[in-house]
Image (spheres, rainbow, N blue to C red):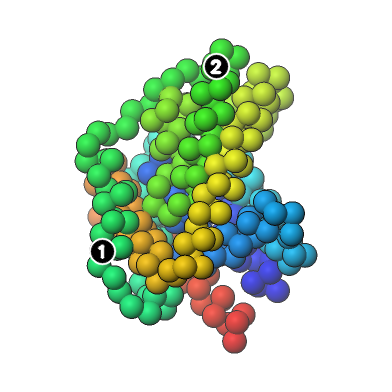
Amino acid sequence: MYEIYIRPLIAGLLMGLANIIPGISGGTIAVITGIFEKLVDALNGLSKLKLKRIELIFLIILAVGELSGLAIGSNILIWAFKNYPFYTYSFFFGLILFSIYALKDEIKGFRIVEFLVGVLLVVIPYLISKPSSIGTTDTSHVNYILLFISGIVSGASMILPGISGSLMLMLLGFYDGTIQAVGRITKQLVLSDVVYLLILGVGTLVGIFLITKLIKIWFARARESIMNFILGLVAGSLYPITPSLHGSGNTGFMLVWFAIGALLIMVINLRGTRAKA
């Protein structure tokens, strides 16, 4: 019951929230909630039109959770990051930091090279240049070819842990337009917003399917290497979401939100362990 319905729903909700925030990866959330390999398998099955019934149920529930997360995030979470970025990032920092400890059971042997490659792949872009929000919020005047390509890049980034799909949209100049379109479409249907999100969505799906095929091949040939690489990606993602980089606040409240994030992951993993027992 928990593994089939509850875990993918929670994971989808958190992935939806994460994919809105530059610097936080939906792929990281998939890893820390324990659904990453299952997601890769299901998406590969879908791309080959050989989807098992259990995988179809998993993807539907995950999609419901993610769409809910996107709808909530486009309003509540955007408000939280605008008004209380320090505490909101504290929550996600606790979420991800505690998940690194939880990942230890997935790795049989630590490999420093793969781990460091993962860390550096996430950290270096932030050290080179701080991303800025560029581009228009007017969805009726957009280069749709570039929008589609941006969707492919963003989709691939959403699956890879530690690499933020929304960050890629920001760097490519489509983040503001996407957030505005998602926010508006939850209140009123506008044709330009529908076309914008449809093209971006198709590009995102193409990117997701392409990257999951590559990951599936890597899992089959060198699972320990990819798990150490993923661990590095997750560890590296702590840098861009460090609370002190996003403002300041009360240390006590920071620790409270840090603990809430850690507790959430602990509960998810505890429930999953019991469900498997």
Residue 185 x, y percent position in the rendering: 66, 29
Residue furthest toward the bottom?
277
Residue furthest toward the top?
141
Q: Quadrant of the N terminus?
A: bottom right
Residue furthest toward the right?
53
Measure the alpha-carbon separation of dots 2 and 1. Answer: 42 Å
Q: How many marks?
A: 2
Residue 182 x, y percent position in the rendering: 60, 32
Circle 1 SS class: helix
**Residue 52, label in figure:** none
- Residue at the location (44% across, 20% down)? 135
**Residue 113, label in figure:** 1
Q: Is residue 204 above or below residue 159?
A: above
Residue 30 x, y percent position in the rendering: 51, 59
Q: Residues within 10 Å of mark 2 (few under 14, many from 20)?
A: some
What residue does disc 2 label? 142
**Residue 276 quadrant:** bottom right
Residue type, mark 1 in image? Val
Residue type, mark 2 in image? Val
Circle 2 SS class: loop
On screen, residue 227 versus residue 61, left or right, reads left
Residue 170 x, y percent position in the rendering: 41, 31
Q: Which of these two is toward me, 75 or 129? A: 129
Q: Which of these two is toward me, 136 or 183? A: 136
- Residue at the location (41% across, 64% down)? 226
